[in-house]
Image: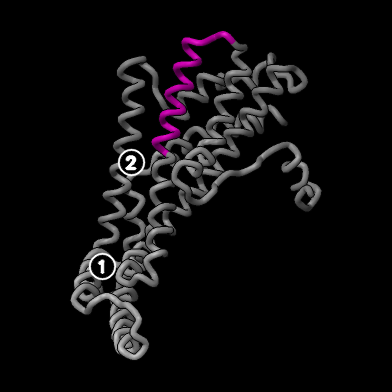
Amino acid sequence: MLSNLLSSINDNVYEFLDKLVFITPDITKSLSPIIGTNNHFGITLICNSLVYGFLLYYGLSYLISHLTFSQIETPLQFIFKLLLCTLALNASEFICSGLISIFSHASNIVCELGNYMFGFDVSFSGLIQDIIPKDYFLSNSFSLFSFDGLVNTSISFGFLSLSISYVIRYIILKVLIIIAPFAILSLSSNKSSWFFKAWFKNFIALLFLQVFIAIILLVCFIIDDKDRFLPSQIMYIGMIYSLFKANSFVREFIGGFSTDTNFSFSNISSIFKGGASK
């Protein structure tokens, strides 16, 4: 039963893991009805209505500033900035697609570099098939209580945990695309511009993650092919751990959300016990 479970994990995970990691601009197509294809419905309609709220807020702040002698930007500066933000929020889907396209092309360049220079299919499907043969868990050589069986079992659950982490990233990216018009509009006021900065940092960090993962995959294939100074099982565990820590590395450089997951045997057992381990 365990061998069938592990074989099923490997067969199903690698088919969609590459699609989850290497995001393309197509991710925005399903969100068009929510964002709004014009300024008459969807999130775009709400944000266009909020433009009048920002105008009213600035007008009141400008009048109060004459009484309190506080510093405030000139009406010409505010109107010009609000106009630019209004134009940008109505093109938020196009802006997000453009940013996604940049990072998608960058990750594709890294993958194609491995294919061109070393002849590797730099992808998760290629890595899984290289690490664990497709019929390994169904063969007579598989034993959970052997070193190879224990390592390969850990690798299989590791890939399952990675897929959960990348699903979280995929969902968060969609959420950030949906709230993009609000983030762009927040730039029109110095009081709310922090929201755009936080949104932009998290959006770029999640997109840059796929470039970083492509580089890790490229290095994994090179190490697997050239550097056999350690047992292959130890190298494979190091590869999986590096992929696990990719999000943490990117957060150290850029910042952003954490999509790390901890999927171990203790977590699995806690599910059957009816609660989380403490």
Q: Please identify, in this view, whether the residue under mark 2 or under mark 1 is nearer the observer.
A: 1
- Taking the image as shown, residue 140 lies to the left or right of residue 247, namely right
Residue numbers of the magenta segment? 210-229
Residue located 34% across and 89% down the image: 64
Up-down relation of residue 147 to residue 264 (above or below): above
Up-down relation of residue 248 to residue 234 (above or below): below
- Taking the image as shown, residue 213 lies to the left or right of residue 102, namely right
Q: Is residue 220 magenta?
A: yes
How far apart, in angstroms, are the residues tagged by discs 2 and 1? 24 Å
Q: Position of residue 278 (x, y in %)?
A: 79, 49
Of marks 2 and 1, which one's residue comes earlier in the chain?
1
Callout 2 amino acid: Phe
Residue located 29% across and 44% down the image: 101
Q: Is residue 33 visible?
A: no
**SS assignment at label 1:** helix
What's the mark number on residue 85?
Answer: 1
Give the crowd class for mark 1: few <14, some 14-19, many >=20 residues within 10 Å. many
Give the crowd class for mark 2: few <14, some 14-19, many >=20 residues within 10 Å. many
> How many numbered marks does the figure carry?
2
- Closer to the camera, 252 or 217? 252
Residue at which label 2 appears: 103
Q: Position of residue 219 (x, y in %)?
A: 45, 22
Q: Quadrant of the N terminus?
A: top right
